[in-house]
Image (cartoon, rainbow, N blue to C red):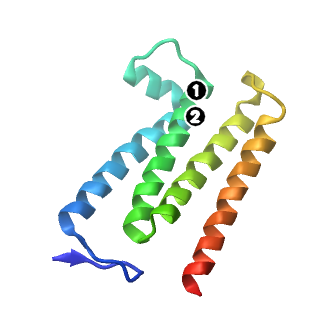
Amino acid sequence: MSTGRTDTGPPRSIPVVVITLLCAASVLVFGVWAFFAPVSFIEYVNYAPYNEHLTHDAGAFQVGIGFGLIAALLWNDALGAALIGFVAGSGLHTWSHFADRHLGGHGSDVPLLGATTLLGIVAVVLLMRRKRA
């Protein structure tokens, strides 16, 4: 038995899909937790000293990995899946720098990170347009 997707790539087996979804869920759960409830997350994992911004960043990148895994199941394009994961992680990373600007960093962090995220979005859009052509 296999699962279909929205493209013409070969179907994947049910075990591969289930394992990939479990992996995605694991990084998404911990990533969302670290990003949105950093104190609770650090208390649970018991790594001191607590650093709110670095915990936000770790959560952002975990979420990006999770999005990339899910995108790989839905889209038979490794570059597209990687870019979607990048955009998700980079977008949250940009937000993290904006929300945590009172904790440190540089004035150029948000614009530069945001520009990189936007470039990733442009690449995804261009890739999708090429696939439809």
| Residue 77 found in image quarter | bottom left
How many residues crowd around disc 2 within 10 Å: few (fewer than 14), some, or many (20 or more)? many
Residue 30 place in picture, x, y as percent: 41, 38
| Residue 97 found in image quarter | top right
Alpha-carbon distance for marks 1 and 2?
Answer: 5 Å
The reply to whether the C-beta atoms of the residues labelled 1 and 2 are less than 8 Å apart is yes
Vertical arrangement, residue 16 with respect to residue 44, above or below: below
Instruction: Give the number of the disc on residue 57.
Output: 2
Vertical arrangement, residue 88 with respect to residue 93, above or below: below
Judge left or right: residue 71 versus residue 133: left
| Residue under numbered circle 1 | 54
Judge left or right: residue 67 versus residue 10: right
Q: Residue at x 43, y 20 (%)?
A: 43
Instruction: Give the number of the disc on residue 96.
Output: none
Is the C terminus in the top left, top right, bottom left or bottom right quadrant? Answer: bottom right
Name of the residue lying farthest toward the top: 49
Q: Secondary structure at mark 1?
A: helix
Judge left or right: residue 121 versus residue 4: right
